[in-house]
Amino acid sequence: MFGKLRLFFSKLSWDWLAVASLALWPLLYYWPVTLGQQVFSEGDINWLFLPIRTELSRALAEGRLPLWTPALQAGYPLFAEGEVAALYPLNLLLAWLLPAASAISYSILFNWVFASVGMYILVRSSGLRVPSAWLAGLVFGFNGFMVAHASHVPHLTVAAWLPWLLLFQQKYWQAKLISQPTSGWFLLICFSIAFQLLGGFPQMAFLNIMTYITIGILWPFLRNCSTKTKRLLWIREIVSQLIQSTIATLLPLVIGIGLAMVQLLPTFELIGFSNRGQELSKTFFTSYSMPPSALMQFISPFSPMGMPDASNMEYWAYLGILPIMLALLAPILSHNLRTRLFVLFAFCALLLALGDSTPIYEWLYYVPIFNRFRVPARFLFLFTFAFVFLAAIGFEEIQKRLDDDRRARVKPVFFASLGTSVLIVIIYLVYNNSIDYWIDAWKILPVLFVLSSVILVLAGIFRLIPRTLWFELVCIVIVIDLAAFASPFLSSLTRMSLPSDLMQSSRTVAAMDTQQSIYRVVVDKAPMTLASIRATLYANLSILYDKQAVKVYLPSLGLQRNENYIGQMTSKMRDLMNIRYYLLPLETVGSFSSALDETEPLNGLSLDLLSKGLNVPPLSLTQIELTSYTDQTAKLPDGFMAGRVTLGTRDGSTITFPIRLGVETADWAYDALTSEQIQHRKPATAISFPAYLKSIGRAFDGSKYVARYELTQNSKPLTITSVHVQSFLPGTGLTIDRIRLVDEAGHATSLASLLNQMDLSLAFRSHTAAMWENLSMIPRAFMVHSAQVVNGEQVLTSLKSPDFNPTRIVLLSDVAPADLVPVNTSTSSNDAVSITEYHAEHVTVNVQTQEPGYLVLTDTWYPGWVAIVDGTLTPVYRADYIFRAVPLPSGSHSVTFEYRPASFILGAAISLGSLVLCLGIVVVGKRNRK
């Protein structure tokens, strides 16, 4: 058996062994993910990429691309945003084969492998030997930048392409230099550029392309990098070469952009409607500049940076101490132009990464394209690339000085065995020691790594050990260094979880209406724990449960108008937004206080609002109905005064009613408590809602209690002009859920609606979150029989007016007054509006109306949406700042909204034309070979 293994390894070249080891390294280091036992689950993976990739999987299962999603911001062009990367080949394959969580994790592993192998082949193609290329591949694919950005999936996807793009460029020039066919390399450049632009992160693609352009234009100098300065081309020849290299560099770039136009045109269109479409402030432009103190990480990574987390993830670029030393030695040991260029490149990238710490970066604010991007620290990626290449050059130069003891020369089988043994020991230590252990260890490890690195460098320069042994020791030190560095990230930025943990159902979702699913949810306060994040459907998590959210996480290209609307929502604007459920996180960490206070629920009948005394229009009432509950009152007895209601009458007198435990109210968790635990009775009239408490350990029915107070005097109704509620319990001990005012005819009016507040009623409560149902929600589609043209930001001002009633009048924008539908506002109209089909890119509404008017659909207005009324195309107006409206005559109508984005269709046509051009290049290339 061992003889066969020896024979097998003897046939393997060092190149194949190097590539295999580089590919295996991240797979073994993150073996729980490789085996499918766990998935990466930190940060943006959890609440950005998992939701949108879930949407991608659903769309593909339905045979379409996710051009639009109704789940974000009242409707959003998801494909155009780009980070879903719906046309990136790897994403399509993984979305077809695997659940979204597993697909994301395997794409992260693939990107690390792809980056490492690409860097190895690029360095080998540049003339360096296997050990130098192996070092470059290992460090480039597993440095601080790559590890810290694991949760930024598109970052890694695009970043991994840089060495491949430069490899294809280099191969193209090498083939051209010796008059060999270049069409194959030319096309590989085109497609690698296209794939980067389809990968989901334009900023990283832009950095890669800028690097490609720089090296491509300077190629006439680089190919003479081994010659002395006096032997460089004469000026005339230099100019001629520069013109040729510029054309040869830009032509595949243009074709690559053309191939990606199916993605780029929708993205360009979205930019005009997004927060990036306006002039960005310098503060935004320079946000996430790397602090100068972070430069200390190259010696001792965790001393200046602290524990890896979301606040510092942009600043990591640790390469290992020995690679840094080798890179610093490169310009001393190698004096060619290539080395000097990489030194200059690395220095400029590091300078730009410092952002507002240097005056130079501010100049880029006035440079087009550059000024569309923030986070200067991302220039660290280009720094790591250049410095890793320099490390390989430094390593190569020292290797050249060493003699190889042929008697001590190892075979691949021995090297593989040694590497495997070291790897097993490292991984055992990584997974069997706590984060605190590693943070403490890194107080000592920098000293050990510096000492070992200095010894190895001196031993190499002064030829104290054979080449093979030196290489083995260098490999061991670098692997241990990088593995130990990545270990603390396992508890933060590369945290892993069970796939089921990411997709587990939330109790709040179970408490929502499942019969009528066309509504939205909102959470205003940021949750502090993972459990409360999931319970409140924070950020984009609503997508996982097929719910539609208002406040979402779109850090790149959120719709500006939608953000303006959402950020300034009044209660009526929330009703118009079709918000049915309001969620509040309750679970806290450390010394933070609960988000539940006297101001909650926001925009509802909070205790803070009721305690101020509220004037209402004079109402003749026979009864007031109060729904309430208490918290943490189990030990209080029957009759305890939890609060009181005071009503002001027209004649200036007041009427007071008690709110007593066991009579009008009681503890909300009454049914979860035993008779020994609770000291008061449960009132007769109670409304139950689903609840859960960790202290109870099970689900149960929570309760809120209805009390009715008679208001008649001498059998006549009283005219009420004010309402005041006072609590005698601390904090949120007493909550008034609803107050309804009943007149002589038995008609009940919600006090919340009289006060222009949302009519919120508690629908679920647990230790992690509370959820209220909005009973005043306006349906998603409805008819309005009066319109007014209001343009610009004045629309928001009108919407926020207390007198604005969205069911009576619609505010249209960018419409000529002459195009308004003549309506009769003097008579009322009995309208019947029902949504019969509701899909992401197709909505059908049936309407029966007696008067002409406007059908309002409170989904986002955006170019590409068309309306077909009874088979006829009809204009879609922007209504109430961000929504859609269609003019309708009286009668019965079938209205269909369809998303047909012209930007996508035109982009697809350009991409198809570019693909045909590429096929033509292939045909011409084959003919030229013949």
Image (cartoon, rainbow, N blue to C red):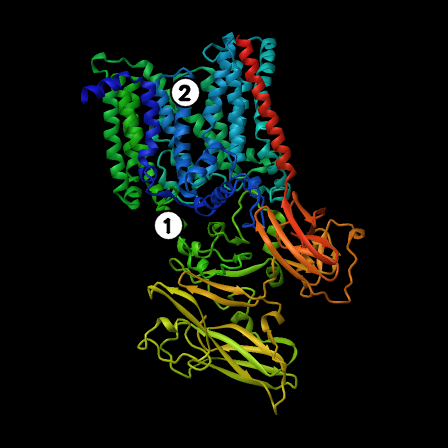
Horizontal side of residue 74 vs 809, given as left or right: left
Residue 445, percent from left and from top:
29, 36
Residue drawn at x 61%, y 69% as measured from the top left: 753
How many marks are shown on the rendered structure?
2
Residue drawn at x 59%, y 73% as measured from the top left: 751
Of the numbered discs in the image, which one, if any, rests on residue 501?
1
Q: Amino acid at mark 1?
A: Asp
Q: On the rendered image, what quadrant is the N terminus found in?
A: top left
Classify 10 Å Cα crowding around label 1: few (below 14), some (14-19), many (20 and above). few
Foreground residue among 917 and 367 = 917
Q: Based on the displayed image, in which of its 4 quarters is residue 115 positioned?
A: top left
Classify 10 Å Cα crowding around label 2: few (below 14), some (14-19), many (20 and above). many
Residue 202, percent from left and from top:
54, 34
Horizontal side of residue 594 vs 431, given as left or right: right
Of the numbered discs in the image, which one, if any, rests on residue 249?
none
Q: Are marks 1 and 2 in contact (CB under 8 Å)?
A: no
In terms of secondary structure, where does tag 2 sit?
Answer: helix
Of the numbered discs in the image, which one, if any, rests on residue 123?
2
Q: Amino acid at mark 2?
A: Val
Residue 226, percent from left and from top:
45, 11
Foreground residue among 625 and 150 = 625
Q: Nearer the viewer, mark 1 or mark 2?
A: 1
Residue 302 against residue 128 in the figure, above or below: below
Residue drawn at x 52%, y 14% as measured from the top left: 182
Check the image and name the residue furthest to the right: 818
Q: Based on the displayed image, in which of its 4 quarters is residue 363 positioned?
A: top right
In terms of secondary structure, where does tag 1 sit?
Answer: helix
User: Label 1 to label 2, Cα distance in Å?
Assistant: 41 Å
Residue drawn at x 61%, y 38% as measured from the top left: 266
Residue 741 against residue 159 in the figure, above or below: below
Which of disc 2 and disc 1 is earlier in sequence?
Answer: 2
Residue 813, percent from left and from top:
72, 51
